[in-house]
Image (cartoon, rainbow, N blue to C red):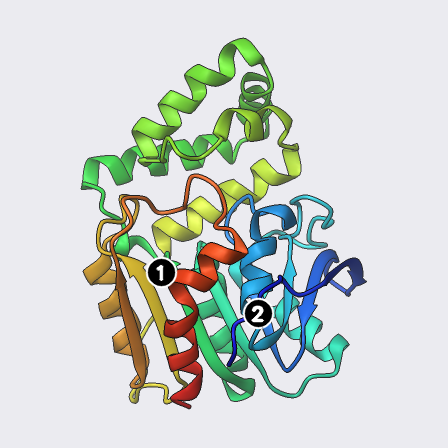
Amino acid sequence: MMRSIHPPAFDIHFMDLPLSRLHVLETGQGEPLIMVPATISELENWQTLAQFMAQWFHVYFFELPGHGGSTPLRESFSSHQVARLVEQMVDHLGYKRFNLMGFSFGGILAMRAYQRLSHRIDRLILIAPCLGRRTLPFSNSRVQLLSTMNRLLGHPGFQARFIGWIHDRRAVSIMVKILQKVGSLEDTLPLENKLLSIPATTISVLNSQLHEILNTHFETGAEKHPTPCYFAMSVFDPMLKFDSSLETVQEHFSNVNAVRLDFPYHQPPKPFTFEELNRDFHETVDAFMGSY
């Protein structure tokens, strides 16, 4: 595939589904690719990655229910509900088969969607995927502390107080330091600005996501899945263990194309530009696409 000089055009619209009204970015032509978002992912954060992948696919990226312009799920948030949402999305679009991509917590969501829809998925792309507790680089005491925070945030009264703290400009910097210390969140993330404006619906979803991260374990089947799987992750990822993440993927898929990166972060300080993605990753993705 020849590199595009200019980013492909894109369209932003809403998609009304039984479970949620999704805020969607659509770009590109060709086979459909559903990009499952990470935590607190908004369209502008992933526009250039969607446009980069649009050189090979007709890309659909959506904001998670309860985030940005997407309405909360009509039922409680869970990865199983998001898998149903992905199914509703591709049915609404009229696709019998499609490709699936997930980053960070989107790894759990993509794996859950794959479990539900494996018979319809041609390729699975996992970028620095969080795949459950096994892949966390935390001690047992740190996990217990996170579990305690998770239980506390599950109480409506405490959650309301927490939202008050993070919406207070004087208190939010202290909360960010606590969250970074307990959860090993990166200084590169613009947490203060995000937390100051984050709605209660998103906090509720984040707490559900934390519960799943701490409790998810994907059981292996009798045989590995033959679906081609592209896995890319930094060996220096500060939030996830590279070896455990790759082992988890290889336990489930027989056809894994693994790429070792050397970034000192989990999520880049700011989104890569279209030019940077083309320069550094075009040949790798093109080789993966040409292999199947």
The residue lying at 59 percent from left, 52 percent from top is 77
Decide: is 270 above or below 262: above
Query: Percent x, y for residue 285?
Result: 42, 74
Q: Which residue is mark 1?
A: 131
Q: Secondary structure at mark 2?
A: loop
Query: Percent x, y for residue 216?
Result: 37, 58
Q: Quadrant of residue 143?
A: top left
Query: Percent x, y for residue 130?
Result: 37, 56
Query: Percent x, y for residue 106?
Result: 48, 58
Viewer-nearest of labels 1 and 2?
A: 2
Q: Which residue is mark 2?
A: 4
The residue lying at 37 percent from left, 89 percent from top is 226
Q: Residue furthest front?
A: 5
Amino acid type shown at disc 2: Ser
Is residue 37 visible from the viewing direction of this image? no
Q: Secondary structure at mark 1?
A: loop
Left or right, residue 71 beside residue 212: right
Q: Residue furthest top?
A: 170
Decide: is 95 above or below 206: below
